[in-house]
Amino acid sequence: MPAAASAAPIDLRSDTVTRPTPAMRRAMAEAEVGDDVYGEDPTVNRLQARAAEIFEREAALFVPSGSMGNLLAIRTWTRPGMEVICEQRAHIVNHELASMSAIAGCLPRTAAAPGGILTWDLIEPLIRPKVYYYAPTGLIELENTHNLHGGTIYPPEVAEDICDRAHAAGLRVHLDGARIFNAAVALGRSVAELTRKFDSVMFCLSKGLGAPVGSMLAGPRDFIEQARVGRKLLGGGMRQVGVLAAAGLVALEESPKILHRDHENARRLAEGLAQLPGIALDPRKVITNIVLFDVRATGRTAEQLCAELARRNVLAGPMDKFMVRMVTHYDVDRAAIDHAVAVTGEILGARGAASSA
């Protein structure tokens, strides 16, 4: 029997699709606000202070998006004509519109790393000699968890070694920690522990934490003050934005407590998908909330399979020609996971039966 149709789409395209919780909506409705460009929004100020406290930093800045947070870090730590060392499939290279080049005037200098996890042995050869006709190395960037490698996590000792060696070489290290709370939950460590040696950290409120809008940039006080100027330059100066910061405060305090459910659901999803014909996937590598799987052997492209899933109310994202991504979040429960696996199985089974007829 075909699985029953779901009343609402099961949206596994990203954890950015979460809807604000009732607690977030109440906080938004009741938020005390002021003009944040003047630094007078009390709710924004509380959010920034709380983020800085949790990450054990001097200061933090509320920004509209993670992409802006990363760009502000690059723009603040570097100058035009410099290079930024990062992993080949890093989000800042593949999904941020080349903003480091178009706006900050920097070039990415990349290395491919197994699982997206750079080591100093991969980074050191990319550091430019201090010769005037080379573009100087301006910054090293790491991503934790690593989106395009399936939510992989940096071993803390590897990240700390990179930071120590970079600092010895006179270089800064920025962390794209869009999903750093997922890494912290998976490792049983605090975000402060995992990020302590980085010079700056960006993390998203609007992904697994579930806030409707916003990210945070944290670091030294003078760095944040410079980033605040850059935020205004980029059009990110916001007015009575406490209505959004209020949801961010709820997300920051409450959502990390339930991220383990997303990880459990992702593993369940991976284990189910791995049993289906034509799907290449190792569930043991799924440790946070991102599931990547190869569909080459199904006889379909990723785009074709995602289109078939969408017609059955299951939404997933094609990442390249044969790679599909599904991301778990708090709006998708275990029953929805099982339904998504069943629908995928029906599609693949139907194709197989037709081919052998």
Image: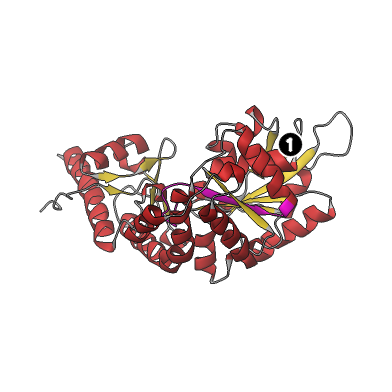
Dividing the picture into quarters, in which one does residue 337 lie? bottom left
> Mostly what secondary structure, the magenta segment?
loop
Q: Nearer the viewer, residue 59 or 100?
A: 59
Q: Secondary structure at mark 1?
A: strand
Q: Nearer the viewer, residue 213 or 34?
A: 34
Tell me: 332 left or right of 138: left
Q: Which residue position holds label 1? A: 83
Q: Residue at x 67, y 47 (%)?
A: 141
Residue 275 to residue 293: above or below: below
Tell me: 205 left or right of 351: right
Residue 301 visible in image: no
Q: Residues within 10 Å of mark 1 (few under 14, many from 20)?
A: many
Q: Give the quarter of the figure containing the C terminus.
A: top left
The stretch drawn in magenta includes residue 50: no
- The image shows residue 279 at horizontal and vertical percentages of 35, 49
Residue 7 visible in image: yes
- The image shows residue 229 at horizontal and vertical percentages of 67, 39
Q: Residue at x 62, y 49 (%)?
A: 113
Tell me which amino acid carries mark 1: Glu
- The image shows residue 129 at horizontal and vertical percentages of 86, 39
Looking at this view, name the residue that lies furthest to the right: 131
Q: Residue at x 58, y 56 (%)?
A: 48
Residue 163 to residue 97: above or below: below
Q: Which residues are magenta?
A: 207-221
The stretch drawn in magenta includes residue 209: yes
- The image shows residue 352 at horizontal and vertical percentages of 22, 43
Q: Residue at x 54, y 55 (%)?
A: 42
